[in-house]
Image: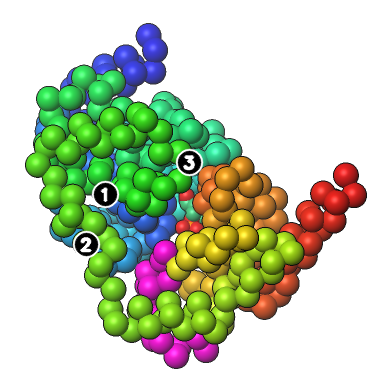
Amino acid sequence: MDTAQQVRLLLSSPQKIVITTHQRPDGDAMGSSLGLLHFLKKENHEVSFISPTDYPDFLKWMPGNETVIIFENQVAKSTQLIEQATVIFCLDFNKIQRLDELGKLIEASAAKKILIDHHLDADDFVTYEFCDVKASSTCELVYLFIMQMEGQSFIDSKIATCLYAGILTDTDRFRVPTTSPAVHRIVAELMEHEIDHSAVYQELYETFSENRLRFFGYAIREKLEVLRDLRLAVIALEREDINRFNLQFGDTEGLVNYPLWIKDVNVSALITLKQKEVKLSLRSKGNFSVEKICREHFNGGGHRNASGGTSPLSVRETRDKLISIFARLKSDLNSA
Ligand code: 5GP
Ligand code: MN
């Protein structure tokens, strides 16, 4: 039996299912988890979705949002659900340590574990994998998973809306190179199910506070460094910048994409402070792999054109380290 057949068999009787995703979930993490939740509920399973942490307000409109359990706020309930689970779906991540404490509970669980993901460099912690590093998004893979489970007729407006939102965000509005003809075909199919795609766009991209937009303006005007010879742009935000705009969770989301608008910039980096650490977000154009940089130097990973990592150094030192990595790459290239 192949993997899909084994999982079809597993899901042919009602299961107690937990779905989980990475910390600080993005549009793809939320869309794929909630899309899968609606599908599995229709298949008569008992399903919960546990997010390790809270997530930005611009993602709090998806169908099923009211059912999301946030682990850091509801540890006892989450622990009980994981202990009782017979099946755990892990979506949009492939390194269990990205889930901290929640990851330890999942590792200890005897449930069958199913990974649906499109990140590079997967750890081996699951029973079944539905992974494809070439996929645009985990939502694309959840759609294909539903097809493999012969669930096409279950797709409805709620499932379609969630999956569409994740594909839209992870392809950065159908821009990044992973946006294949298959992605457009899937989107066309999803749009047959009464999605209000303009409303989805508005929820995701047109719900800024005035303060957040002014902060973007400030960051681009005052904080952006363009290192033309390295084809690198860096925005490094210090505590005083965050305090000045009273930045809330999710307010920096998307900022890293803007410096790529500059013709000669190939890589854009955002360095900022999260609760416990310095966080990097890297984006690139074309073939340049920011995944390699994040994996080798910043204990992170992701995709070729969009990756993240962390740093034990200060914001300033992290910026200096990043620039020196690019300077070294350039001199290696010149001497090659
Ligand atoms: P972002 O820059 O938006 O936080 O993340 C971009 C991509 O890199 C996402 O696919 C995300 O899952 C991945 N990523 C972000 N931070 C980390 C990290 O610390 N470790 C790993 N392995 N991947 C990360
Ligand atoms: Mn994703």
Residue 28 sits above or below residue 1 on the image: below
Q: Residues within 10 Å of mark 3 (few under 14, many from 20)?
A: some
The residue indicated by pointer 2 is 203
Farthest residue toward the top?
Answer: 1
In which quadrant is the C terminus drawn?
A: top right
Q: Quadrant of the N terminus?
A: top left
Magenta includes 152? no
* Magenta region, residue range: 240-254
Q: Are marks 1 and 2 in contact (CB under 8 Å)?
A: yes
Which circle's residue, 1 or 3, is located before the other in the chain? 1
Mark 3 highlights which residue?
177
Location of residue 331 in the rendering, given as x and y in whole percent from the top left corner: 85, 56
- The amino acid marked with disc number 3 is Pro
59 or 170, nearer to the observer: 170
The residue sitting at 48% across, 33% down in the picture is 134
Crowding at dot 2, Cα within 10 Å, few <14 / some 14-19 / many 20+, comes out as some
Q: Quote the CA–CA distance across marks 3 and 2.
A: 24 Å
Q: Earlier in the sequence, mark 1 or mark 2?
A: 1
Q: Residue at x 39, y 12 (%)?
A: 2
CA distance for labels 1 and 2: 10 Å
At mark 3, the secondary structure is loop
- The residue lying furthest to the right in this view is 335
Q: Identify residue for label 1.
A: 165
First-in-chain label (3 vs 2): 3
